[in-house]
Image (cartoon, rainbow, N blue to C red):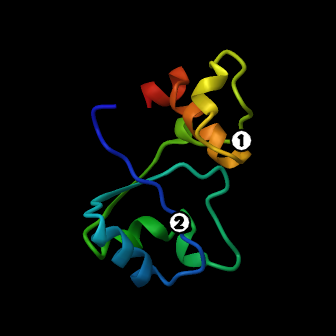
Amino acid sequence: MPYPFHTIGHSTRPIAEFVALLRVAEITLVIDIRTVRRSRANPQFNSEVLPEELAAFGIGYEYIAELGGLRGKAHDIPPALNASGSTRVFTITPTTRCRPSFLTA
């Protein structure tokens, strides 16, 4: 892929801690791929609030539905591509990165 990308989960962090982690990696744009973009327990990460919260720290926000969503393992991808992960969470990632919707997004 020509552009590097990083993944991060927000966990239960306050927004300032989340931003501190982004700054360590020099992240200037967050791409949200969550299917459900809200949290009762952590409302600072709700889609109605997060873009403004990040903007206050000079970090951009964009939602790209095509990169996320609930999806299973693609059966047309060679099994060797998924050999790097030992759990379903890790094996879906390489498979997803080969899908046309991911590459287009």
Front residue of 26/47: it is: 26
Q: Residue at x 63, y 18 (%)?
A: 78
Q: Which mark is residue 101?
A: none
Q: CA distance from mark 1 to mark 2?
A: 21 Å
Left or right: 76 with respect to 55?
A: right
Residue placed furthest toward the top: 76
Vertical position of residue 91 compared to residue 7: above or below: above
Is disc 1 in contact with disc 2, using a CB cutoff of under 8 Å?
Answer: no
N-terminal-most mark, 1 or 2: 2
Front residue of 74/14: it is: 74
In which image quadrant can residue 22 be found? bottom left
Vertical position of residue 42 compared to residue 96: above or below: below
Front residue of 4/66: it is: 4
Say what amino acid the circle numbered 1 marks. Leu
Q: Secondary structure at mark 1?
A: loop
Q: Residues within 10 Å of mark 2 (few under 14, many from 20)?
A: few
Say which residue label 2 marks.
48
Q: Secondary structure at mark 2?
A: loop
In which image quadrant can residue 1 be found? top left
Instruction: Name the spot of residue 101 as percent of width and height, x first.
Output: 53, 26
Instruction: Name the spot of residue 97 as percent of width and height, x first.
Output: 51, 32
Q: Residue at x 52, y 20 (%)?
A: 100
In which image quadrant can residue 94 be found? top right
Q: Which mark is residue 70?
A: 1
Q: Residue at x 67, y 15 (%)?
A: 76
Say what amino acid the circle numbered 2 marks. Glu
Q: Residues within 10 Å of mark 1 (few under 14, many from 20)?
A: few
